[in-house]
């Protein structure tokens, strides 16, 4: 695939990261990476995956820029909440048990306790109505894991939203973004991990530019189900999913609509012009790199190591070089498309704004819309995830209109 010529503009400005640091909303820590982890927990709250009071209780005992204290406190919180869930379950209080198991799952997940996270999530999922279905999609000698959340019992064909996360999302966490909100609106919600995400890394899969290949396997599975309407199948990509889903849509024409939050047509521009990874890669191996590691702190270094593993990169320089292969031509997108971005995100870096403008201009389908999350309601950051109520409202309202829904779920 040739690069879309408008993405080769040499005048694309570099990110003003200092401006971003001053303008962003601070939730608990001045350290941007630990604070971002708090946002990841907060966006699960509207879907039942966390509670603000529990988050504040855990973080109040932490040391800033200390990942070990983060893991320790959230593991302890997960253990306390899981004990409460089991107490409710023994007493026959299934709703309380389900809600509490879900929250325990999220706390174990952010502490890196993967087995405990899955155990609690599946315990809660079995008590959902209908229960969440763990799914394994065969793919290249292994599988892509997912959860299929039916809107209702039975095999009636229903609107279905495939949800793909980013480089740091975990499958179980991903459900809380749109799962409960979609089901309440009559949608099946299908959360899936693509190669290089979550558990797929343990099976030897890494990030790949041709995301249409794994998406084909996902769509094949979805359309084999009797409860998926073949003309009402959409996909939403969050963060790096804002590359994965649009790229897949360039070739996977069975997707009836996509949502990109936000749209990333060129991974190399994103990594070098917008994220700090380009700067980190340039300083890697120099006398300044130990200072950069010190400034990033223990909250960031494990993330850099994880990124290299997920991308199959030897180091950060290799990671940035690999990102050159991740690009798409927006003109090949021939389905309705919704672009979401945050007010602060597209002002701290003109690169973000430019990518959204390029997409809006180039996407072939006439049904295309861009919605920017406003700072006034806290929906201005990366992926709007600090306010998933806002994100889900605009996403599902747009899909409802697209699928000519009679909104009978409001009756």
Image: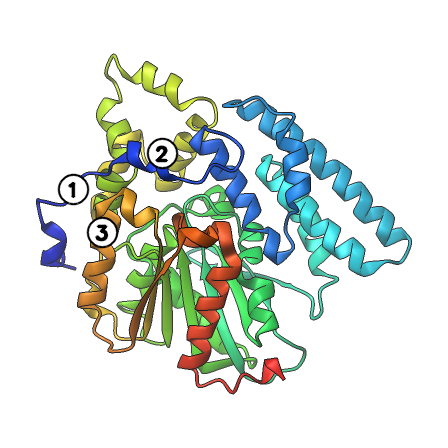
Q: Earlier in the sequence, mark 3 or mark 1?
A: 1
Question: Where does label 3 land, which residue?
Answer: 266
Percent across and percent down for residue 149 are 60, 67
* Viewer can see residue 185: yes
Q: Which residue is mark 2?
A: 21
Decide which of 370, 211 is in the foreground and name it: 370
Determine the residue located farthest toward the top in the rendered image. 287
Give SS at disc 1.
loop
The answer to which of marks 2 and 1 sits earlier in the sequence is: 1
Residue 237 position in % (x across, y down): 40, 59
Relative to 263, is 138 on the left or the right?
Answer: right
Residue pointed to by mark 1 = 13
Give the answer, above or below, for where 14 lies relative to 411: above
3 vs 2, front mark: 2
Q: Is residue 140 left or right of residue 57?
A: left
Q: CA distance from mark 2 to mark 1?
A: 17 Å
In this view, the mark in front (2 or 1): 2
Q: Earlier in the sequence, mark 3 or mark 2?
A: 2
Q: Is residue 255 placed above or below 1 in the rendered structure?
A: below
Give the structural element (helix, strand or loop) at label 3: loop
Q: Is residue 96 left or right of residue 391?
A: right
Which quadrant would residue 68 be assigned to in this image?
Answer: top right
Q: Give above or below for 191 relative to 345.
A: below
Q: Residue at x 25, y 58 (%)?
A: 356
Q: Residues within 10 Å of mark 3 (few under 14, many from 20)?
A: many
Quarter the C terminus occupies: bottom right
Position of the N terminus by quadrant: bottom left
Q: Residue 290 location, x and y as percent?
A: 33, 14
């Amino acid at each position: 695939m040739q690069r879309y010529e408008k993405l080769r503009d040499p005048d694309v400005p570099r990110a003003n990261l200092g401006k971003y640091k001053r303008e962003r909303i601070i939730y608990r820590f001045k350290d941007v990476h630990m604070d971002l982890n708090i946002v990841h927990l907060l966006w699960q709250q509207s879907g039942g995956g966390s509670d603000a009071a529990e988050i504040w209780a855990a973080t109040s005992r932490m040391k800033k820029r200390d990942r070990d204290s983060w893991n320790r406190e959230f593991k302890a919180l997960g253990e306390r909440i899981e004990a409460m869930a089991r107490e409710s379950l023994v007493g026959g209080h299934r709703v309380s048990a389900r809600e509490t198991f879900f929250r325990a799952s999220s706390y174990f997940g952010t502490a890196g306790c993967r087995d405990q996270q899955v155990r609690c999530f599946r315990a809660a999922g079995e008590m959902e109505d209908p229960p969440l279905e763990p799914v394994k999609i065969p793919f290249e000698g292994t599988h892509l894991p997912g959860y299929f959340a039916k809107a209702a019992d039975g095999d009636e064909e229903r609107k279905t939203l495939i949800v793909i996360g980013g480089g740091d999302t975990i499958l179980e966490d991903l459900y809380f973004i749109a799962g409960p909100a979609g089901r309440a609106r009559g949608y099946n919600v299908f959360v899936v991990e693509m190669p290089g995400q979550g558990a797929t890394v343990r099976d030897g899969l890494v990030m790949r530019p041709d995301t249409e290949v794994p998406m084909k396997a996902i769509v094949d599975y979805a359309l084999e189900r009797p409860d998926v309407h073949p003309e009402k199948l959409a996909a939403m990509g969050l963060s790096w999913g804002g590359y994965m889903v649009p790229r897949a849509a360039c070739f996977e024409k069975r997707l009836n609509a996509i949502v990109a939050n936000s749209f990333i047509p060129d991974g190399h521009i994103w990594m070098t012009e917008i994220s700090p990874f380009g700067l980190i890669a340039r300083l890697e191996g120099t006398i300044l790199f130990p200072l950069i590691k010190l400034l990033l702190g223990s909250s960031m270094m494990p993330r850099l190591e994880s990124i290299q593993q997920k991308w199959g990169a030897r180091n950060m320089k290799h990671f940035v070089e690999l990102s050159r292969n991740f690009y798409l031509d927006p003109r090949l997108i021939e389905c309705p498309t919704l672009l979401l971005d945050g007010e602060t995100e597209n002002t701290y870096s003109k690169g973000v704004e430019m990518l959204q403008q390029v997409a809006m201009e180039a996407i072939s389908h006439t049904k295309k819309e861009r919605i920017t999350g406003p700072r006034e309601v806290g929906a201005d950051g990366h992926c709007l995830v600090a306010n998933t109520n806002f994100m889900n409202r605009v996403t599902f309202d747009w899909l409802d209109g697209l699928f000519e829904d009679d909104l009978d779920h409001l009756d």
